[in-house]
Amino acid sequence: MIRDRGRIKWTAMMLPEHIEQLREWQKEDEHQLRQQPDEQQLEQWNYQIHEAAERNLQLSIRYWDNEKVVESRGYIQKINMLDGTLHLISDNSETHRISFIHLESISETE
């Protein structure tokens, strides 16, 4: 096995501009591609959201925030159809306002 330090050993011979560009490229590699949900997925999420609101069930919602996927758990406080947002209260009484277009997945938690 080759014990190589990779890019670290070459940074001493690079210009600061090149190092900056390499760091930017590394950050871009961490970004994930957003996929658009189909109609069946949207209907299922709609059902899950309304069912959780009626029965006061805890949900685990994954959503996009600045090109990264974030997960929040909590109970639905409010569904605002005009704004297209969902208000989720977590266990520590923190309110998350999540837009429907930023949803990635929804699941019930126990």
Image (cartoon, helix red, strand yellow):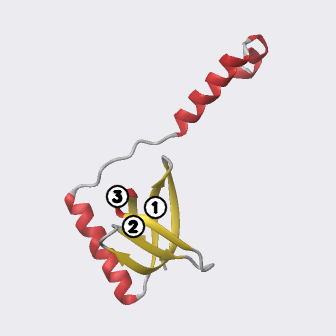
Of badges 3 and 2, nearer the viewer stands 3
The kind of secondary structure element at disc 2 is strand
Residue 24 x, y percent position in the rendering: 60, 29
Query: First in sequence: mark 3 or mark 1?
Result: 1
Q: Are marks 1 and 2 in contact (CB under 8 Å)?
A: yes
Within 10 Å of the Cα at label 3, are there few (<14), some (14-19), or many (20+) other Cα atoms?
few
Query: Which amino acid lies under the numbered mark 2 shown in the image of this protein?
Result: Ile
Q: CA distance from mark 1 to mark 2?
A: 6 Å
State the residue position of label 2.
106
Residue 67 x, y percent position in the rendering: 48, 46
At x 52%, y 58%, the residue is: 70
State the residue position of label 3.
101
Residue 92 x, y percent position in the rendering: 63, 78
Give the residue furthest to the left. Answer: 39
Query: Which amino acid lies under the numbered mark 1 shown in the image of this protein?
Result: Arg
Q: Nearer the viewer, residue 46 or 100?
A: 100
Give the residue furthest to the bottom. Answer: 55
Residue 95 vs 70, above or below: the answer is: below
Is 84 left or right of 7, judged from the image as shown? left
Query: First in sequence: mark 3 or mark 2?
Result: 3
State the residue position of label 1.
62
State whether residue 101 appears in this view: yes
Q: CA distance from mark 3 to mark 1?
A: 12 Å
At x 50%, y 40%, the residue is: 31
